[in-house]
């Protein structure tokens, strides 16, 4: 039995550039293993190679070197295709179709019996939050609704692996939350979700593992808790009032009309600050520890790549 949902070995891809540029190296020896079940985030700046990698995985384009295996078999194996659901970035659907007609069309490509397909289509549209919108033409769908119906078509064959290219791009905060919740629900159902994104906060909220790609090369990968660490980097202490006791010398101070927030760098500083605030009878509102964020890891990885590290 395969131990990985996706296994990528030494993937390279070149594209023709202008005459003065020559070939453009889009992927520079990408190696990646995506475990079965769970949510894997594939993040990187624009032009880093995310979409190119996803297109190779799904067989839409071919690599110049390297191989891709899905559940232990070649990604070009016909039987493997049924195990993959794919949502491209900014998908184009025939806008005269209704949401129901779109999902039925994609389902028919998998030779699903008509009665079963009809039931599955209605179930999926309800799952993605489009119940009551099944008969609405796609031209009347919002960006968020198009993303949802795109997810429904990606799920119509009941795939074990879901590949999503920027699934939360262009959505408002409510739409992003709904897509995040749906991805988490699909994980609970035992599916493997591999998605690309440049929205780091969303990736940090839901991913079990991530890989960071910069200039066609993987520069970081692993479980989030291992990459970010468990060590607290600083503490924010908020208290009622606008005056800071002279005994305190915080690195950062944010003052508001009715409260003040100070940033401290060690547990000892926090303990001393709490003692001083209590002595001065200042009401403590909150003590919030901050660990390293995915955004910080991402920015440092990009910066190191620029410096040739």
Image: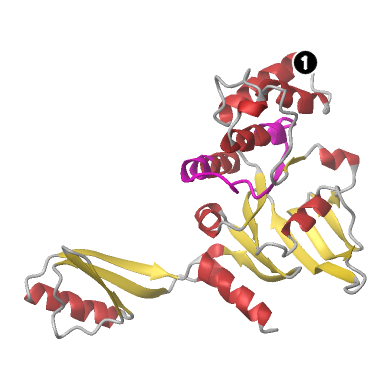
Q: Is residue 149 above or below residue 217?
A: above
Q: Is residue 82 above or below residue 257?
A: above
Q: Which residue is mark 1?
A: 114
Is 174 magenta? The answer is: yes
The one nearer the camera, 216 or 156, is 216
Q: Quadrant of residue 147?
A: top right
Residue 213 rendering spot, x and y as whole percentages: 69, 66
Determine crowd level at label 1: few under 14, some 14-19, many 20+ residues with C-alpha closer than 10 A: few
Residue 122 rendering spot, x and y as whole percentages: 63, 20
Q: Is residue 169 above or below residue 306?
A: above
The one nearer the camera, 291 or 14, is 14
Is 143 magenta? The answer is: no
Residue bounds of the magenta highlight = 152-178
Q: How many labels were placed on the picture?
A: 1
Q: In this image, 306 relative to 2: left or right?
A: left
Q: Give the farthest residue toward the top.
A: 115
Residue 96 rendering spot, x and y as whole percentages: 72, 23
Q: Quadrant of residue 284?
A: bottom left
Where disc 1 sits, the SS reads helix
What residue appears at the point 32 percent right and 81 percent down from the top-left corner? 266
Residue 264 rendering spot, x and y as whole percentages: 30, 78
What residue appears at the point 77 percent right and 15 percent down from the top-left corner? 114
Q: In this image, 234 relative to 54: left or right?
A: left
What residue appears at the point 85 percent right and 47 percent down from the top-left corner? 60
């Amino acid at each position: 039995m395969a131990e990985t949902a996706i296994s990528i070995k030494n993937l390279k891809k070149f594209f023709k550039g202008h005459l003065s540029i020559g070939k453009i190296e889009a992927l520079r020896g990408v190696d990646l293993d995506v475990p079965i079940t769970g949510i894997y985030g594939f993040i990187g700046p624009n032009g880093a190679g995310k979409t190119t990698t996803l297109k190779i995985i799904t067989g839409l384009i071919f690599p110049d070197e390297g191989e891709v295996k899905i559940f232990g078999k070649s990604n070009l194996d016909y039987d493997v295709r049924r195990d993959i659901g794919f949502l491209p970035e900014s998908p184009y659907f025939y806008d005269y179709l209704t949401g129901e007609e779109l999902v039925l069309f994609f389902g028919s490509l998998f030779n699903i019996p008509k009665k079963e397909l009809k039931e599955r289509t209605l179930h999926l549209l309800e799952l993605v939050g489009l119940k009551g919108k099944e008969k609405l033409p796609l031209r009347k769908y919002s960006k968020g609704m198009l993303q949802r119906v795109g997810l429904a078509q990606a799920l119509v064959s009941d795939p074990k692996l879901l590949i999503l290219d920027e699934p939360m791009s262009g959505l408002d905060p409510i739409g992003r939350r709904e897509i995040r919740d749906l991805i988490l629900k699909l994980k609970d159902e035992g599916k493997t979700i591999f998605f690309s994104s440049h929205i780091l906060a969303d990736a940090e909220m839901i991913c079990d593992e991530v890989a960071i790609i910069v200039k066609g090369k993987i520069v970081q990968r692993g479980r989030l808790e291992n990459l970010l660490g468990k060590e607290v980097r600083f503490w924010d202490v908020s208290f009622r009032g606008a005056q800071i006791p002279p005994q305190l010398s915080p690195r950062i101070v944010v003052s508001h009309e009715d409260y003040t927030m100070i940033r401290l760098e060690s547990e000892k500083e926090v303990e001393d600050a709490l003692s001083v605030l209590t002595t001065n009878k200042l009401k403590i509102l909150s003590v919030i520890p901050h660990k390293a964020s995915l955004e910080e890891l991402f920015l440092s990885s990009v910066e190191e790549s620029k410096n040739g590290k």
